Structures are given as C-alpha cells and as structure tokens.
Amino acid sequence: MHLITKYFPELTAEQIERFSRLEALYTEWNAKINVISRKDMDQLYLRHVLHSLSIAKVCRFEAGARILDVGCGGGFPSIPLAILFPEAHFTAADSIGKKIKVVEGVSTALGLKNVIPHWGRVEELPHRYDYVISRAVTEMPRFVGWIWEKIERGQKGTLPNGILYLKGGDLAEELALTRKRWTLYEIPAFFEEEFFETKKVVYTQK
C-alpha cells in the first residue's frame, strides 16, 4: 500500500481506505475463484494496482469520461483507476463469467458506483466510449479490430480520446501492423521499481 501513497500523495482519505482494502478483498475472492497467481498475490500492489495506475500518469480522466476495460480479468486496470477517478465511468468487460463475478464482488464491497461489470464479448456492447484501456489481452492488430469503432472522437481527459494499453517488450513490429500512430510511454519514467523495467503505456488517438 505504501507504493500507492508514494506515487499518489494527493489521495483522499476515502481513496486510501479503498486502496488499502484491495489486498484483503482479492485474497478472499482468490480463495474462491483463482484469478491472480499466488506469486502475484504477494505483490498485488506492485504488479496489479500500481501497474494499473501507470495509465493515470499518462492520462487523467475528466468527470463524466467513459472508459472501457477490455479483458479486465479480476478488475485490472479498471478498479484501481475507478478508485482514483471516482467521477469517471468504467465498464469492466471480460468473456469469462467467474472473473466478472470477482469484479462485481470487489466493486460492491468498496462501494464503487462508477464500475459496470460486463460479462461477454466487447463487440456486443452497444455503447461508445471515450477511452479503451487494457492490459496485454491480445495482439494489438486484433485488439484494434475489436474496439476501434467503439471509441468516440473528442477529449475527456488530458489526452485526446483513444486507446491506453499496458504492454511490455519490443512492440515495434506489432504496432506497425495496426497502421495507427502510437506513442509509447516508458513506465520507469514514473515508477522506479525494477518490475516496470520493460513495461509501457501504449497510446493512440482516435
């Protein structure tokens, strides 16, 4: 938890309380539905919570912004970002029902009114969004094909609307196949922990 307050010292008391409860909630849910490996549970705040929040170092979402988290798993990056941006609206989508059950349970326990869990394929969602976020859910050309038409043009944050994607390694070839113009933000520019050494926030504007 100290990692969160280290990099986000402006948190309110309510935000600190919600972040501090994540470990117990995910430990409880993970015992029922295994969505996070045991090794990662021991490093929850580093590998999941702080990693999710690296998106906030690249783009701050405005009140009313609509954000779609594709392949959210147990709620990353959407739940940490929903705590940080309580006036933005998050749809956390995953095709695996038991993962959405975890998102529902954690969101309810925290009293997060700005998270809508969605069980199903994102292509079936009827709405459009300002930003699409995700964490290494598939190859980028396929991902762009899934969600590009779901993004509304405009600007509801410190960057124009678009995709904010968490990924690591050498991405040049994969990104080139999408025929979009990408900006890569190196996460070590924001966080000094070794875990983030090769990790990036990858962004493109709609």
Image: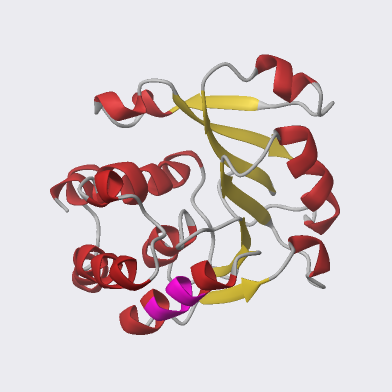
Query: Magenta region's main secondary structure?
Result: helix
- Residue 105 is situated, as x and y percent measured from the top left of the image, at 40, 80
The question of residue 102 being in magenta is answered with yes
Horizontally, residue 121 falls left or right of residue 7, namely: right
- The number of numbered badges drawn on the structure is 0
Magenta region: which residues? 101-105
| Quarter of the picture holding the C terminus | top right
Q: Position of residue 199 (x, y in %)?
A: 44, 27
**Residue 57 lies in the magenta-colored region:** no
Determine which quarter of the picture holds residue 62: bottom right
What residue do we see at 60% from left, 43% from top? 164
Q: Look at 74% across and 64% down and name the residue there.
A: 121
Image x and y of residue 139, in percent: 70, 34
Is residue 167 shown left or right of residue 34? Answer: right
108 to 198, vertically: above or below: below
Q: Does residue 52 appear left or right of residue 182 in this picture?
A: left
- Location of residue 85 by image quarter: bottom left
**In front of the other: 206 or 134:** 134
Q: Which residue is at a point 77% across and 55% down the rendered structure image? A: 151
117 relative to 145, above or below: below
Residue at the far left in the pictured view: 2
Q: Nearer the viewer, residue 114 or 27?
A: 27
Tell me which residue sits at (24%, 65%) in the image.
Answer: 27
Q: Is residue 194 above or below residue 24?
A: above
- Residue 8 in view of the camera: no
Residue 134, given in percent of the width and then of the height, sits at 58, 48
Left or right of 166: which side holds 53?
left
Quarter assignment of residue 171: top right
